[in-house]
Image: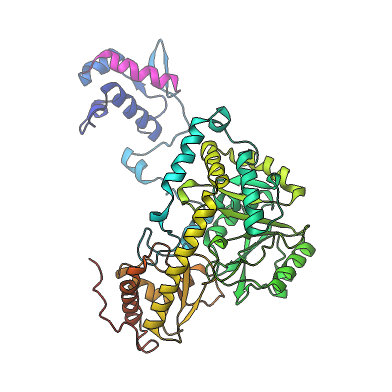
Amino acid sequence: MEFDWLLAPPLPDAVPRQRLLYRRLREAILSGRLPPGTRLPASRSLAASLGIARNTVLFAYEQLAAEGCLEADRQGTRVARLPVRSAVSFDDAKTARAPQQLSARAADMLESMPVGEEGALPFSLGVQDYSAFPFRAWRACLERAWRDVSWRQLGYTREGGDPVLREALAGHLTSVRGLPVDAGQVVITSGAQAALDLCARLLADQGETVWVENPGYIAARAAFSLAGLRVHDVAVDAEGLAPAEGDWRDHCPRLIMATPSHQYPTGRVMSLARRLALIERAQQAGAWIVEDDYNSEFRRGGPAPPALFGLQSDAPVVYLGSFSKTLYPGLRLGYAVLPRAVAADFARAAAMATRAGQGVEQRALADFILRGHYAAHLRRMRARYAARQAALRAALIAAFGEQVELSGGEAGLHLVLWLPDEVPDAEVLRHAAAHGLGAQALSGFTRPPAECNGLVLGYGNLAEGAIAEAIDRLAAAIRAAGGRSSYPGAGASAAPAPPA
């Protein structure tokens, strides 16, 4: 057998000959090009035929023998018998491989993701105003945390998270959100998504049913699906999650995911009567309610409605929050607040499931909260976002008329512009993307049989001076999608051409 192909061109740059020879021999053995039992030339003979040093061949042979790919004895060196393909030809073996792919659950998760531009385009969803971030105060807290760092901050964090942060966060939630909690009920997580994942794995077993809002938070569906739960869509109405008797009877839940204070993405608020009814039915069904208090920090027009968590002392509610929108998403810190009866066990199980870190950042965040920087930052951003939303509302009414239907203005960083049935939001989205807009279609957050038709317009990163020009582009996209008759006044000013 000829072995000249082992070092045949093209040869990769900066790869030593001994490493290259080893890799090509190993690939040939594992692919079946060199079948089990094939006798290799003696090291001197192969070195002479390839024009390389004998030590180069010895290195490759010894390494492959150590890995079990070659066997050497007094009779020579031969390919070991390994469970590899016996290929008819080397080229056929390469093309005969079964395609590698993700699981069906992962494919479904990717298919369900809403279409939208990532980044800081006008109307991008979930992008806050980073220019107003308190860099100096945050940097000082980080510097103090690093100055006082110990082995505890450098290792895995304690069960439940840094105790100073848990204490600071409990005080913040009690004073600002009215939650009757102590530090032992708070579990620090690597963001809200990690908290959802923990709830899916620690509060339910594989195959049990979880309710999600429809339309709702697509990433929550992903967390529940990947945990092996059966996802059941429950309709949303003007008061948020609206389960029917058939939902309770035919799809009895173990988990109920809800955003009652600012439904995502419609922004609707659940009434007190429905909150109390949901808690009562969940208790009867033996279900947990996972309450995501989405963007309640940016509430306008009065205090936020009471959280489900604090309505009844024995309510089966887990309260979730994060710092992704209030500070920045790269911080990757969130939290879960649990009833006292299960908080300690949940914290121990979470520590085993995640082996969390970020001890220095957790201590810096505790310092940031205790010094009052966090509360002051929330007050500033609440006022800034309120002004932007007011300007956006006024611009939308001026462009589309008083009949335009908007929702989601009580809190958060986005509005929903509802569209008439004859103007499909997916078609508007296609034209909006061509005009450099980051809006998202409301239908992208739904699953059948929900019928939602609108645009989700983020304004966190949209300066007031840029709103008019962005509305011009949006009006052009709606006109292009067939909305001229529905909004006859849309785009009275000349809209710019789509960006190149």
Main secondary-structure element of the magenta-colored stretch: helix
Most foreground residue, 3 or 180: 180
Q: Give the residue displayed 73% in from the left and 52% down from the top.
A: 339
Q: Is residue 145 left or right of residue 160?
A: left
Q: Quadrant of residue 159?
A: top right
Q: Give the residue displayed 62% in from the left and 40% down from the top.
A: 164
Q: Is residue 461 above or below residue 44?
A: below
Q: Give the residue displayed 68% in from the left and 40% down from the top.
A: 348
Residue farthest toward the top in the current orientation of the protein: 74
Residue 112 lies, in percent from the top left, at 49, 63
Magenta highlight on residue 55: yes
Most foreground residue, 500 or 81: 500
Please give the range of residues in magenta: 52-67
Residue 150 lies, in percent from the top left, at 55, 28
What colour scheme governs how the chains and residues are painted in the rendered image of this protein? Answer: rainbow
Q: Is residue 223 left or right of residue 484?
A: right
Q: Is residue 365 above or below residue 300?
A: above
Q: Is residue 207 visible?
A: no
Residue 220 lies, in percent from the top left, at 56, 58
